[in-house]
Image: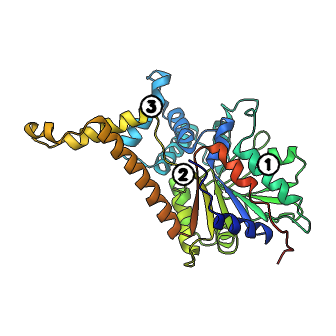
Amino acid sequence: MAIQFPDSYRRELRKAWQERRLVPYLGAGVSAPYGLPQWTDLVMRILIDESWQTFGEFWKNYQTPLAVWMTENFDFGLESLSRFAKSKFVANTGRRQRRYFNEYVDRKLYEKMPPAPPAGPTTLTAVADLIAASEAMPGGRAIPSVVSLNFDDLLETELTARGIACEPVFGQRRRKASRLGIIHAHGYLPRGGRTPASDLIFTEDDYHRFALQSIHWAQVELLSLLRNKTGLFIGLSMSDANLRRLLDATADGRKSRHFVIRKRFTLSGAQRQEAAHRIHERAMTGLDPSDRGQMMKDAPQLEHAINQMLAEAQRIDTTLLEEMGVATIWVDEFAEIEQVLQQIPAGRKTAAP
C-alpha cells in the first residue's frame, strides 16, 4: 500500500509551514533506533534492579519476561509500576531528593546505548532535516519550537552537530529567542555531566501532579501550542492520557488542526499465530464439547477475521483521533516518515503573520 497522505493534509501542513506555526511533537519511536529503551523497558529495568530481593533469584534472561507477565496478567499500569520502582529506590538508598532519582533514571536511559549511531537516515535525522530547512527560511524559522516527550538529548546532539543553535527547555527559566527551543514537557536528562534539576513526569504521582496543576509550566506551554499552532506528532502512539486530555481541552470543533504520522496496524506471522490461538481458546471457552466441532473455524476463516479486525482497529483509531482534532497520515514502514516530512517545506514562502 502507498503512503496515505491526502492532498488536503499536505496543503494544510504546507500552509502551517508557510505561516510559521508548524510544531513537531516527538515520541519514543524517534529515539528507539538509537538503542534507547521504550518507556516499558525503562520502567522494567528500574523495577527489576530495585526489586533485586524478588528478581535476583531468577536467571537474568527470565527477569524481564516475568516482570512483563506480572504486569499484563494482573493489569498493573506502567505509571503505577514506575511509582513502586521509585519508592523501592528511595527505600533502598535512603535518598529522597528528586535529583538522586533523576540521576538514576539518566544512567538507566543511556546504559545500553551503542557508541555509534545507526547507519543511514532515521526518523530523527529526517526531523533534523526539516528543522534545518526551517532555520534556512528567509525572514525567520518556519518551526517556532519543537516538543519532545522524551527525556533524551538526541535531537539537541544532532542539531548541534549541524551547527543549528538550539536550547533544551525543561522549566520556567527564560530562553534565548535566537535559539530553537526544544521543549521537554516530561523532563530532560542529557548524557554526561551533572543531571539538571528537571521535573520528570515519570511515575503515577508525577502524572497526577501534572494533571492537577493548571499552572505547571509544561501544561501552560502545551496548551498554548495546541491552541495556536499546528502540531505534527511523530513517533508517538497517541495513548498518553495527559496528551489526549490536552487535545480534548483545546479542540474547537474543526475537523482537524493537528496531524500524526502512524504505521499501519500489522502483525507478523508469529503474532498472527498467537492471536489466532488466543481467539480460538476464548471462543471455545464455555461451549459444550458436542458443539465445538460445529462452532470451530478453520485457519483461513480466522485469518480473514483477524484481517478484518486490524482494519477495524485502524478505523477506530483514526476516528477517535479525529474527534480530538488530529488527522492521521498512515505509512507502511517507519522509513516512509522521511518521505512525508520532505513534502512539507514546499510551495510559496510567505512572511510571518
Q: CA distance from mark 3 to mark 2?
A: 21 Å
Residue type at mark 1? Answer: Glu
| Residue on which disc 2 sits | 203
Identify residue type, mark 2. Thr
Where's residue 73, x and y in %?
Answer: 35, 41
* Residue depicted at 60% across the width and 48% down the height: 96
Q: Nearer the viewer, residue 227 or 299?
A: 299
Q: In the visual, does 148 lie left or right of 283?
A: right
Looking at the image, residue 353 lies above or below residue 300? below
SS state under label 2: loop
Q: Position of residue 134 (x, y in %)?
A: 83, 60
CA distance separating discs 2 and 1 = 25 Å
Q: Nearer the viewer, mark 2 or mark 1?
A: 1
The mark found on residue 65 in the picture is 3
Q: Are marks 3 and 2 in contact (CB under 8 Å)?
A: no
State which quadrant residue 207 falls in.
Answer: bottom right
Tag 1 or tag 2, which sits nearer the N-term? 1
Q: Mark 3 falls on what kind of element? A: helix
In the rendered structure, find residue 156 and report the number of the disc placed on it. Answer: 1
Q: Secondary structure at mark 1?
A: helix
Question: How far apart, in angstroms, are the residues tagged by discs 3 and 1?
Answer: 34 Å
Residue at horizontal 47 percent and vertical 64 percent from the top = 320
The disc, 3 or 1, on the residue closer to the chain's N-terminal end is 3
Circle 3/circle 1 CB separation < 8 Å: no
